[in-house]
Image (cartoon, grey):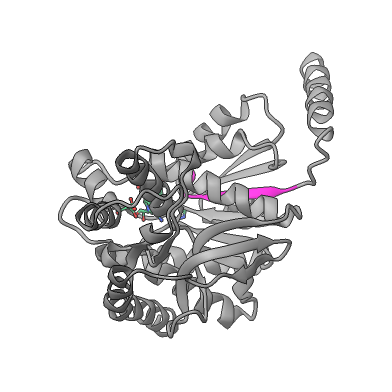
């Protein structure tokens, strides 16, 4: 009795503090919420005042994560779901679904080496999304992103729910890294730095466009090539530093929270929300490509072009197309075979 009174009055307090912003009801699910990315990402989404309901799903461990995160006195109500028979409830009514479910790399592996396990996981989760929340914006983090996004698109097509405006490969970590590394070399305030990163999310398919970086710094060519390589190898740098204990989790949770926040702002009608993401695209000959995307009330509002590229970036673009094409085709083939 006392507990329920306290809970109700807390809800009123929370309701008052957030109603001033009049943020609409938004349900967000994290699939893989008990993992290395999932836990800090769940924390960051709990801190986001645009979220009213936070649904944490995993095949194990979510009751503990949900109980823990739910004690934080912010707007959203948190519920943990565990095991496949609770997946439907976790997804029902979702506006945004973030997917960091799947195995991470160990030293010596490429992202494509994760395909055999993660492709099946993503396929299963997307089948459930098509059934329980077909209109949600899907933020795909699970690797290899260059293949898991095409897998998701095929699953949704088969289910008759595919909307290319609602499917995103999360490449925000590449942008976060490019900004950090550039700021270091350009001696710029990192908070003011912008660098678009296009292409895909693996090795040379990651193409940072430092020629468009702001503030401009006129860095010499050898510095730009080193920055490009470091951005492309950023994931591997973390995998090696963690020495068998996984890949980027904390910086990825930050990047995932940033991208989900941009999606929520777009849904809520905030103008001029632009982020790089791997989406269905016609700006190159490939069906999916990462570039700047304007987000709106239906997800992708506009896929923005590449802008002017330096000769070095043009070469990088030519070099990445065959690898990205084959990763996309591998995903499409998997989804249609199994
Ligand atoms: N897009 C990007 O920039 C990045 C992507 N990643 C990728 O994110 C994925 C997750 O990485 P970590 O969190 O470090 O791995 P992790 O192993 O720590 O966590 C993965 C979680 O997924 C859960 N899981 C497995 N199968 C599931 C299923 N069917 N349904 C729901 N949950 C399931 C596991 O129980 C585990 O809790 C990896 O594939 C990794 O390569 C990692 C960093 C950056
Ligand atoms: O490198 C990995 O395996 C994880 C990842 O995608 C990243 O950190 O960019």
- Magenta-colored span: 26-33
User: Does the magenta run of residues contain 103?
Assistant: no
Query: In the displayed structure, would residue 29 be above or below residue 317?
Result: above
Residue 287 lies, in percent from the top left, at: 47, 81
Residue at 76%, 55% (x, y): give it: 269
Residues 116 and 169: in front is: 169
Q: Quarter holding the C terminus?
A: bottom left
Q: Is residue 16 left or right of residue 294?
A: right
Q: Residue, x 18% and y 41% (percent of image)? A: 243
Residue 147 visible in the shown view: yes
Name the foreground residue: 20 vs 180. 180
In the image, taking residue 337 as reference, residue 104 lies left or right, namely left
Residue 65 rendering spot, x and y as whole percentages:
51, 34
Q: Position of residue 44 (x, y in %)?
A: 54, 36
Determine if the magenta segment contains residue 30: yes
* Residue 130 percent coordinates (x, y): 62, 70
Residue nearest the viewer, comparing 48 with 29: 48
Q: Is residue 232 left or right of residue 54?
A: left
Say whether residue 209 is left or right of residue 16.
Answer: left
């Amino acid at each position: 009795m006392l507990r329920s009174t306290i809970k109700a009055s807390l809800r009123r307090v929370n309701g008052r503090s957030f109603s001033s912003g009049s943020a609409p009801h938004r349900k967000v699910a994290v699939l893989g919420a008990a993992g290395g990315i999932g836990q800090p990402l769940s924390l960051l989404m709990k801190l986001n005042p645009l979220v009213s309901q936070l649904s944490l799903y995993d095949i194990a461990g979510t009751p503990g994560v949900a109980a823990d995160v739910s004690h934080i006195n912010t707007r959203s109500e948190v519920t943990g779901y565990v095991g496949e028979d609770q997946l439907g409830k976790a997804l029902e009514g979702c506006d945004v679904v973030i997917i960091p479910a799947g195995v991470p790399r160990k030293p010596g592996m490429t992202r494509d080496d994760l395909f055999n396990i993660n492709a099946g996981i993503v396929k299963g989760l997307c089948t459930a999304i098509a059934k329980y929340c077909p209109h949600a914006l899907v933020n795909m983090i699970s690797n290899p992103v260059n293949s898991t996004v095409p897998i998701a698109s095929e699953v949704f097509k088969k289910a008759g729910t595919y909307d290319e405006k609602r499917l995103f490969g999360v490449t925000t970590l590449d942008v976060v890294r490019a900004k950090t590394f550039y700021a270091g070399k350009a001696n710029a305030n990192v908070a003011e730095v912008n660098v678009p990163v296009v292409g895909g999310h693996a090795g040379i398919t990651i193409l940072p466009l430092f020629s468009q970086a702001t503030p401009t710094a006129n860095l010499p060519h050898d510095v730009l090539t080193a920055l490009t390589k470091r951005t492309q190898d950023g994931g591997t740098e973390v995998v090696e530093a963690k020495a068998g204990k996984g890949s980027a989790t904390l910086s990825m949770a930050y990047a995932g929270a940033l991208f989900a926040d941009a999606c929520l702002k777009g849904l809520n009608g905030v103008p001029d929300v632009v982020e790089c993401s791997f989406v269905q695209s016609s700006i190159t000959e490939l069906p999916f490509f990462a570039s700047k995307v304007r987000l709106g009330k239906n997800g992708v509002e506009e896929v923005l072009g590449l802008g002017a590229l330096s000769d070095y970036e043009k070469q990088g673009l030519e070099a990445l197309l065959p690898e990205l094409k084959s990763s996309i085709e591998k995903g499409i083939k998997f989804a249609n075979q199994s």
